[in-house]
Image (tube, rainbow, N blue to C red):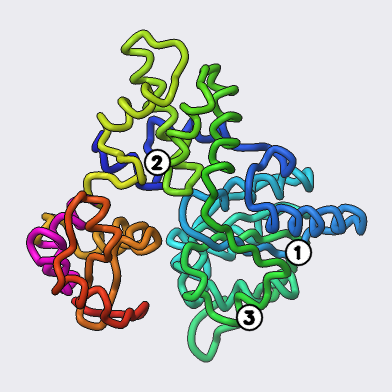
Amino acid sequence: MKAADLAVPAPEPGDRELDAALRPKNLDDFVGQERVRKQLSLVLAASKIRGRSADHVLMSGPPGLGKTTLAMIVAAEMNAPLRISSGPAIQHAGDLAAILSSLSEGEVLFLDEIHRMSRPAEEMLYMAMEDFRVDIIVGKGAGATAIPLELPPFTLVGATTRAGLLPGPLRDRFGFTGHLEFYSVGELELVLRRSAGMLDLKLTSAGFAEIAGRSRGTPRIANRLLRRVRDWALVHGIETIDARTASAALDMYEVDVRGLDRLDRSVLEALVNKFNGGPVGLSTLAIAVGEESETVETVAEPFLVREGLLGRTPRGRIALPAAWEHLGLKMPRNAVAAAMLPFDEDDDEQ
């Protein structure tokens, strides 16, 4: 395992069974996202009182915050079966028609990364969500015939990491939309306490705080770091994990006190040491750290920007004062001037 992988929300094959076991099974056990949890609870409770399928639900937010878990909870709370698919797997309208036609009444259909679904499938989904009907086209050209197919009432739960890419007509057909936010350290400690109990681990309060503080506000990362700390403690014969043990374990995996991994620090060090704090183009920065531009932009940058360590300007990426401080370096005057450049969230500088 690469050290950088510990701070990337994508699950690893060996951890999938544990991830599934650690997922909360109902809203009462779900930690954090208080606003979304209360709103969703009300939607589901009202649906059960009416005796009808719940409204379609859209969950948006960064990876690892609980979108898939909430989809499973929706099915569990409604006592309904769950069908799981994803946007990239539905590239033709026929793929979606096959899934929809096999749904049973009240079933929950979860589509992960729904924004990556093909346009023909999206257009078919409009009618399915609103009228519970799809038109199957038989034949081609002038002889083509549309055969209407009635669908049983179902609940669609869509998840997306990029809600802005969803077309308006699709977004408007969801009865409830919830945006998941990053977790606070206190909320992550609650997640870790629950997971530690299920894994039969003993941690001190300081041990929980140490892991939570390095988890980048993401429960999936927190649970992954907990397992790596568990492994380190097991090998070293330590029964109770305290802050010192957790710190030593995570230092070995190159996850620092702010949750930065090897790639994050490489980006900051290249900006500071090779380019005097920037500005520098994305492709040049990627070459300097030996990674693809897409990797730097999608894996490292979001966290660094959120932490106030890196800025995106019309002229390129720059290291902010907090980056110099985190690396233990003094910020030169010309870097101060660069840090005062206007930011541009839609910067396409390469």
Distance, label 3 to label 2, CA atoms, is 55 Å
Residue in the image at 48% along x and 77% along y: 119
Image quadrant in which the N terminus is located: top left
Q: CA distance from mark 3 to mark 1?
A: 27 Å
Q: Nearer the viewer, mark 3 or mark 2?
A: 2
For the C terminus, which image quadrant?
Answer: bottom left
At a point 59% along the width and 65% down the height, the residue shown is: 97
Q: Secondary structure at mark 1?
A: loop
Residue 162: mark in rendering? none
The image position of residue 135, as x and y in percent, is 64, 76
Q: Position of residue 242 (x, y in %)?
A: 44, 21
Q: Is residue 95 above or below residue 212?
A: below
Which tag is nearer the camera, tag 2 or tag 1?
2
Kind of residue at disc 3 = Ala
Towards the viewer: 139 or 50: 50
Residue on which disc 3 sits: 146
Q: What residue would you read off at disc 2?
A: 214
Query: Going from the N terminus, do you reach mark 3 or mark 2 first?
Result: 3
* Earlier-in-chain disc, 2 versus 1: 1
Q: Which residues are magenta?
A: 265-287
Asked if the stretch drawn in magenta spans residue 179, the answer is: no
Which residue corresponds to mark 1?
Answer: 55
> How crowded is the residue under tag 2: few (<14 C-alpha within 10 Å), some, or many (20+)?
many
Left or right of 147? Residue 137 is left
In this rendered view, identify the residue nearer to me: 7 or 308. Answer: 308
Marks 2 and 1 sit apart, C-alpha to C-alpha, by 37 Å
Left or right placement of residue 270 versus residue 12 in this view = left
Residue 20's x, y, as percent? Answer: 54, 34
User: Residue type at mark 2?
Assistant: Arg
Q: Residues within 10 Å of mark 3 (few under 14, many from 20)?
A: few
